[in-house]
Amino acid sequence: MSTTFHEDVSSNVLRQMKEGGFDFTRVHPIEFYAVFEDRDGAHTAARNFRGESINAQILPREDGTWNLQVSKVMYATFDSIGNFEQDLEELVEPLGGVLDGWGVTQELGGGGF
C-alpha cells in the first residue's frame, strides 16, 4: 500500500476524530493491525512489542489468516501514528505481514447512570 494512501486515510480519520470531539490533549491506547498468512510470522512480530506502554496480541481470523494487534499508549497525532505505522510495516513485511490499519476508542462525554 502506498504511503500517500496511508497519509490520506490517517488524515481523514484524525479529522473525523477532531469533529467528534476527541481529546487530543491526553494519551490513548491506539491499536495497530497487521495480517499474516501464518501464526509463526504473527508470533515472531508480536515478540517485538512488549513493554509498559505497548502490548501485542495475535488472534485467528475466520479466513485462516492471523491478526496481529499492537496497542501503544501515545498521543494521537499524524506524525506519531505515521512513524509507528512505518516502524511496524518495516518489521512485519519481512515476516509476511501486511498492515491493516489503526484505530482508537473514543470515550463518549456526559454522565453515566
Image: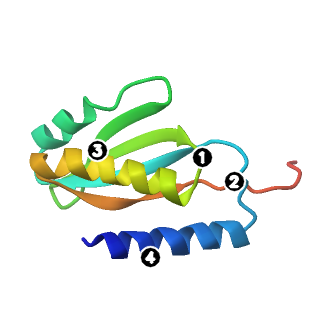
Q: How far, Cα to Cα, is label 1 from label 4?
A: 19 Å
Q: How is the image coloured?
A: rainbow
At which x and y percent is residue 97? 17, 53
At which x and y percent is residue 56? 36, 36
Nearer the viewer's eye, disc 2 or disc 3? 2
Nearer the viewer's eye, disc 1 or disc 3? 1
Q: How far, Cα to Cα, is label 4 from label 2?
A: 19 Å
Residue 5: numbered disc: none
Q: Which residue is mark 3?
A: 59
How packed mark 1 is, by other alpha carbons closer than 10 Å (few <14, some 14-19, many 20 or more), is some
Which amino acid type corresponds to the residue marked 2 in the rendered image? Phe
Q: Which residue is mark 4?
A: 8
Taking the spot 22% from the left edge, 49% from the top edge, the residue there is 90
Q: Which residue is mark 2?
A: 24
Asked if the residues shown at circle 1 and circle 4 are in contact, with their CB atoms under 8 angstroms apart, the answer is no
How packed mark 3 is, by other alpha carbons closer than 10 Å (few <14, some 14-19, many 20 or more), is some
Earlier-in-chain disc, 1 versus 3: 3
Asked if the residues shown at circle 1 and circle 2 are in contact, with their CB atoms under 8 angstroms apart, the answer is yes
Residue 104 higher or lower than 56, as above or below: below
Q: Is residue 14 left or right of residue 40?
A: right
State the residue in front, 6 or 62. 6
Residue 63, picture quadrant: bottom left
Nearer the viewer's eye, disc 4 or disc 3? 4
Q: How far, Cα to Cα, is label 4 from label 3?
A: 28 Å
Q: How far, Cα to Cα, is label 2 from label 3?
A: 29 Å
Q: Which residue is mark 1?
A: 75
Taking the spot 88% from the left edge, 48% from the top edge, the residue there is 113
Which amino acid type corresponds to the residue marked 4 in the rendered image? Asp
